[in-house]
Image (cartoon, grey):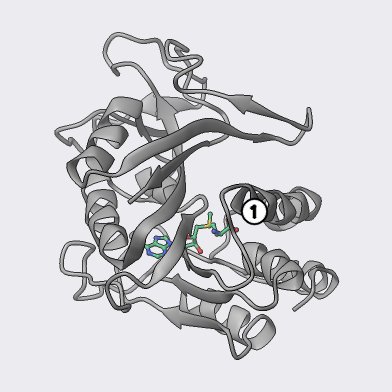
Amino acid sequence: MNKVLWEKNVGNFSKNIEPGYQSSLVKLSQEGSYWTSVLESYGLYRDCSILDIGCGNGMLPAFLLEKHPQIQYDGIDVSQEAVDFCNAHCASENARFQHTDVTNSYYTNQNSEYSSKNFKLPFADDSFDFVILLSVFTHMWLEDIEAYINQIHRVLKKNGVCMATFYTTPGKVDTEPDPMQHHRPAPDQPRSYDYWTCHNRPPLAKIGYRIPDILAIYQKKNFEKISLFHEWNLKNGIEIPRGELFPHSPRLTPTQDCFIVRK
Ligand SMILES: C[S@@+](CC[C@H](N)C(=O)[O-])C[C@H]1O[C@@H](n2cnc3c(N)ncnc32)[C@H](O)[C@@H]1O
């Protein structure tokens, strides 16, 4: 599917995509080309293999595959509808999409017998040069993220790169003000770690974590941290570095931070 077709189709798709998502087609178009350029800057080349976890409605492959038709692309998603859409519009000999049967209380209705803990990514060890998750860990509990990161480590080739976006804050729930009006620490579903969610929405609609808690998960697998930056600021058209440069920002970032690590 080229990007014009994607823009035409995606407006009709999908009840599983967050409200407001369909209406921001221009933003999404820019995001697809933006993430393609980020991948290029981390060494994406003609024969690379990439796994896109939570591929959604094909925002990334629509742009990535148009520019790099020869890369090996695999997309997986818990939404059967998303996978059907991508299979209808984006699949090719070297671009495959498959449904993954894991419960996500926000995105899936069914109670699958698989949770992230007993889930195994359906790929062989050392298969991919890149694994990317855009706005996916923003809808998962931290223990499920850890299970995914363990699997990502397994399927990445040596020196392979994982890029994943998160909502983050450096501080502690109890010691910081409500970072944004519509966010709150979420005591209704206690966990052993700090997290933030939105008022009046299910927790997995939008969930954020502390940067040190996220980094600790990568460190357990001995991932090498390459970069932590604030996601493209589409309004300003500039990339805002974050994390190490602004470690004491008290705010839960209104857009996401990207963690880039190498196996
Ligand atoms: C906000 S959308 C982002 C889609 C796409 N990555 C993008 O940036 O346009 C989140 C996607 O993650 C998928 N998802 C949620 N939990 C998942 C899981 N545990 N494994 C795989 N996909 C998941 C959802 O079905 C949804 O398509």
> Who is closer to the viewer here, 146 or 80?
146
On the image, which quarter does residue 158 sit in? bottom left
On the image, which quarter does residue 64 sit in? bottom right
Does residue 244 lie above or below 208 as drawn?
above
Residue named by callout 1 = 40
Residue 137 percent coordinates (x, y): 40, 49
> Who is closer to the viewer here, 29 or 122?
122
Residue at 45%, 19% (x, y): give it: 244
Relative horizontal placement of residue 176, taking residue 23 as reference (left or right): left
Does residue 114 lie above or below 204 as drawn?
below
- The N terminus - image quarter: bottom right
Residue 82 percent coordinates (x, y): 55, 74
Residue at 70%, 70% (x, y): give it: 68
> Who is closer to the viewer here, 179 or 258?
258
Residue 99 percent coordinates (x, y): 42, 79
Does residue 129 lie above or below 83 as drawn?
above
Residue 187 percent coordinates (x, y): 24, 30
Residue 199 appears in view:
no
Picture mark count: 1
Mark 1, secondary structure of its residue: helix
Amino acid type of the residue tagged 1 in the rendering: Glu
Residue at 69%, 51% (x, y): give it: 37
Mark 1 and ligand 1: say if the CB distance to the nearest ligand atom is below 8 Å. no
Residue at 57%, 29% (x, y): give it: 254
Residue 57 appears in view:
yes
Relative horizontal placement of residue 227, taking residue 20 as reference (left or right): left
- Please rate how many residues cluster around mark 1, counting C-alpha atoms within 10 Å: few if below 14, some from 14 to 19, many from 20: few
> Who is closer to the viewer here, 204 or 68?
68
